[in-house]
Image (cartoon, rainbow, N blue to C red):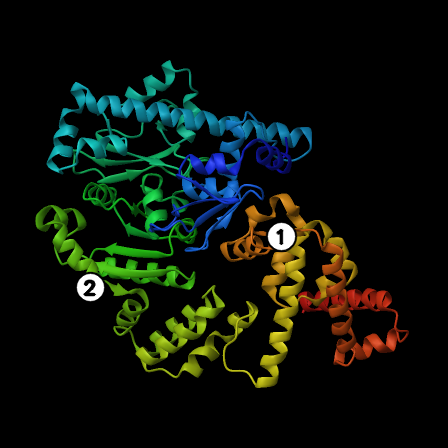
Amino acid sequence: MQSRDAIRVIKERLNIVDVVRRYVELKRNGPRWVAPCPFHQETKPSFSVNEEKGLFYCFGCQASGDLFDFYGRINGLDFRDTLEQLAAELGIEIERGGRSSGGESRQRERQSERQAMLRMHELAAAHFAEALRGPDGAECRAYIEKRGLSDEIVERFGLGWAGRGWQSLTDSLRRAGYNLGQAAQAGLLGTSGTGRAYDRFRGRLIFPIRSLSNQIIAFGGRIIGGEDEAKYINSADTPIYKKGEHLYGLAQARRAIAASGEAMLTEGYMDVLTLHQFGYANAVGVLGTALTPEQVKRLSGFASRLLLLFDGDRAGRKAALRSCEMLLTRGLSCRVVLMPEGEDIDSLLRGQGKEAFEALQAKAQEGLRFCVDALRALAPRESVEWARDFLGHVEVPELVSPYASSLSRQLQISEEELRRGAAVRLDARGGHAGPAPAATQALKARQNMRDVQIMIYAVRYPERLADLRELGADLALRSAGARRFWDIIEEWGAEETPYHLDERQKKFWFAQRGPDKPPLETGDWELECLRRDLETYYARTKKSSISAALRENTGNSDFAADLEYLRALKETLENGHEQS
């Protein structure tokens, strides 16, 4: 069935209380079920589930949503993986791809290829794990013992051994009936000039890389002996794996991160394993690449705070600066710990113990302060350019002002100068680069309130968007954020909209439809109130410059005709702006 039908059927067949009970010990409290929240550390029962409405809400961390939101958040899954897992649980097959038979056939073929690659990776992981336990794995086991990794960590992360032979995994895949060409496309095998397949990973300690749905999608390998070869090699990008989108250890760390609200971010496989062994179960690694926007987005679904752990050399400082910039502009909080010279996480924890590591954490610099200190090494002009560029990329408008004030104070730069440099980008996102006159602020407040009123109705009654459009509500929306929100509702409808919203939009959605809101029974009355407000707004609009043309071309007080003209005029202006 199609996704929308699957969502409806899953909600009909699964009770949110039963789903939540898999992870949380709920207790009845009147019409609701309550418990300590599983998404942040607490002991009070601030987490509430409304069985009748199928929604949950935490009064502490404001986590909210339906059973899809809960299941995805507790398991660290995006909506697509959540939908597929719950559908599979109920034996529901979800339709994929386009409507044409050719499109559907190709989509089924791609899905079949993906599933085969996932099964090959599971076989490869079992092959490597068995090799580590066997006679051929003795030298790798000796290295693991030397590095002090416990059996529990080896088991939890599924470590393995790729022997030195060229055909070991190849033969296993062949015996299992897999296409070796497809195995090469999946990154497990290489192909010689004569077309013969061979093992890509040889003589290496193997680190399986898991997706958030806990499927093995790639491997990393550290050379054991043979130090003239590359120390680490990683799976290349494949149909099931994009390096810049995943983080090592996130599948194992996601619950600890969600519970604490903070993630530790480091660079290497061994660093992640050592941190977990010493009790830091919220540690993840960036998989041999600089931190990417996709990785930041993935982390932001679990934590609002990050502790960055980097080497103290020049490369480590540069990586920390770039990471701070990416996190701060997205609205996340971060602190930076730089390892002392000659030390890494593994040597520090094993040589000096947790006390030394905790002492470093206690002295961790706040992210923006770290950036400022790093900028002091640059020429003043470069510092100003960095600060302007940074402000121009801030994605959360309300953070622009405190960031600008802090940067101007610490860099001793005019705040007005900084804001002027970032004003164009801020304005494009509906931001505000400086203080506005009182009249302008009052006008903007009215516009914002009108946008809020329209979107409250659109969220409460998404099936009545056509009624709002008849009133010209879509034309009255002024903020880019409100228009984006409207477009999502229009595209996905009431059933799927919540799963395509960002965190801020989702909070608004459930705030208007949640357990504490009035029942959705007064749509006609709420629409009539909104109609009166919009008629007042359009009457006021006729006094503005744009309504001079409106008045001249209509002049008959016909509200419906005025709306049609205004809609056409808006389209003309927008087209002209796109062509200019």
In the picture shown, does residue 362 fall above or below 52? below
Q: What element carries label 2?
A: loop
| Res 290 seen here | no
Residue bearing mark 1: 488
Q: Which amino acid does label 1 sit on?
A: Ile
In the picture shown, does residue 374 fall above or below 216? below
Cα–Cα gap, marks 2 and 1: 44 Å
In the picture shown, does residue 92 fall above or below 537? above
Q: Is mark 1 on a helix, strand or loop?
A: helix
Q: Residue at the far front: name it.
A: 30
Query: Which sits in the foreground, 19 or 122?
Result: 19
Q: Residue at the far right: name it.
A: 556
- Residue 441 placement (x, y as % from top left): 58, 80
Residue positioned 56% across, 50% down in the render: 515
Residue positioned 16% across, 36% down in the render: 149
Q: Tell me if 272 is positioned left or right of 37 in this view.
A: left
- Residue 480 placement (x, y as % from top left): 60, 64
In terms of sequence position, does the residue under pointer 2 or pointer 1 come before the other?
2
Query: Which sits in the foreground, 70 or 549?
Result: 70
Residue bearing mark 2: 363
Q: Tell me if 464 is positioned left or right of 389 in this view.
A: right
Q: Residue at the far top: name it.
A: 175
Instruction: Tell me, for residue 259, which label it has, or none.
Output: none
Q: Tell me if 472 is positioned left or right of 453 in this view.
A: right
